[in-house]
Image: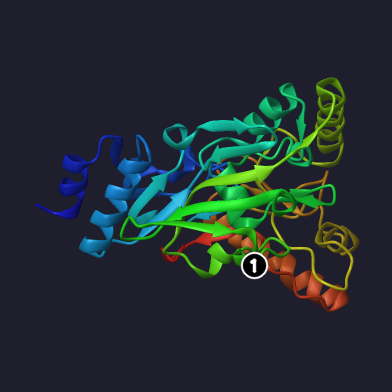
Amino acid sequence: MDWTEHLEKAARGKVSRGEPMSRHTTFGVGGPADVFFEPLDEEDLRNALRLLSLEGVRRAIIGRGANLLFSDEGYGGCVIRIGKGLGSIDYDGRTVKLGAGVSLQSAVVKLAEKGLCGLENLAGIPGTIGGAVWMNAGAFGRSISSCITNVRAVGSGGEELSLEKEALAFGYRKSFFQENPDLTIVGAEIETGDENPAAIKEKIKGMIADRKRKQPWGARSAGSFFRNPPGAAPAGALIDQAGLKGLSSGGARVSSVHANFIINTGGATCSDVLSLADEVRKRVFAFCGVELEPEVKLLLDGSF
């Protein structure tokens, strides 16, 4: 019996073989994973991580597939999707515990309904709490780290860790977890503020309207493709100034709305996206001497 059969026998959640990653990423790009697993709950996840560790199988953890780019060849190993099985929200006054599988938009809306503010800047980001913590997602000058107090994670052996904010090394699109890939985020505790629900909802409405004006809303993308370089103009401005809006490679194109978005116009491959991104980097460097670095996480060799 190989590891796939062991997982199928032990898991209580859904296990699929050869699942195309294009179905599970906002980019709509990516070949088949050897195995795709959606744990039923936290215990199911811990058991799977232990099994994969013992079998020496590499794994990638994803949420709603935002900010990710899988290879056209797929993923040799197990992709674990953290979703509804870790989707709890528990309230204790202004302290809120969120499962890693909770969607950001759902969390923003539900907190607003209770008059709890702090996450509304993340409205419209198509990710999960786990993914947002992992990359310290932010918008409109505020990151999720501003309200994080504690994060729970599990190790490759299924052991649980509780990490206070001081240990999480948050920075611009950075966190402790990026340097510790054996850890899987399972939940986060945040401290919110009190505000009138109607006022919070109005802020959310305004932020989503702003996104719709300034970003290619509705297009398939991974969000901002490049990090904003330190000491320089934002990546989107540099790409725009270099005259690259509309530049394309196969089914991938630099958005004409926001130059830091590479969009899938239909049928784009990972190769198309990487080819276009490389050309953008070369031309921006030639234009202004700034080396752009991807913000999107590239799952090309399983090291995630």
Looking at the image, residue 253 sits to the left or right of residue 25; the answer is right
Where 172 sits versus 82, above or below? below
Looking at the image, residue 253 sits to the left or right of residue 158; the answer is right
Image-quadrant location for residue 97: top right
**Residue at position x 48%, y 40% in the image:** 24
Direction front: furthest residue = 93
**What residue type is disc 1 on?**
Ala
Q: Residues within 10 Å of mark 1 (few under 14, many from 20)?
A: some
Image x and y of residue 109, in percent: 70, 27
Image x and y of residue 68, in percent: 56, 52
Where 178 sits versus 207, above or below? below
Where 21 sits versus 274, above or below? above
Where 113 sits versus 179, above or below? above
Image-quadrant location for residue 37: top left
**Residue at position x 90%, y 62% in the image:** 241
Front-lying residue, 216 or 170: 170
**Residue at position x 72%, y 21% in the image:** 113
Front-lying residue, 187 or 269: 187
Looking at the image, residue 200 sits to the left or right of residue 101; the answer is right
- State whether residue 73 appears in this view: no
Pointer 1 residue: 169
Looking at the image, residue 138 sits to the left or right of residue 84; the answer is right
- State whether residue 281 appears in this view: yes
Q: How many marks?
A: 1
Image x and y of residue 164, in percent: 59, 59
Q: Secondary structure at mark 1?
A: loop
Image x and y of residue 297, in percent: 57, 59
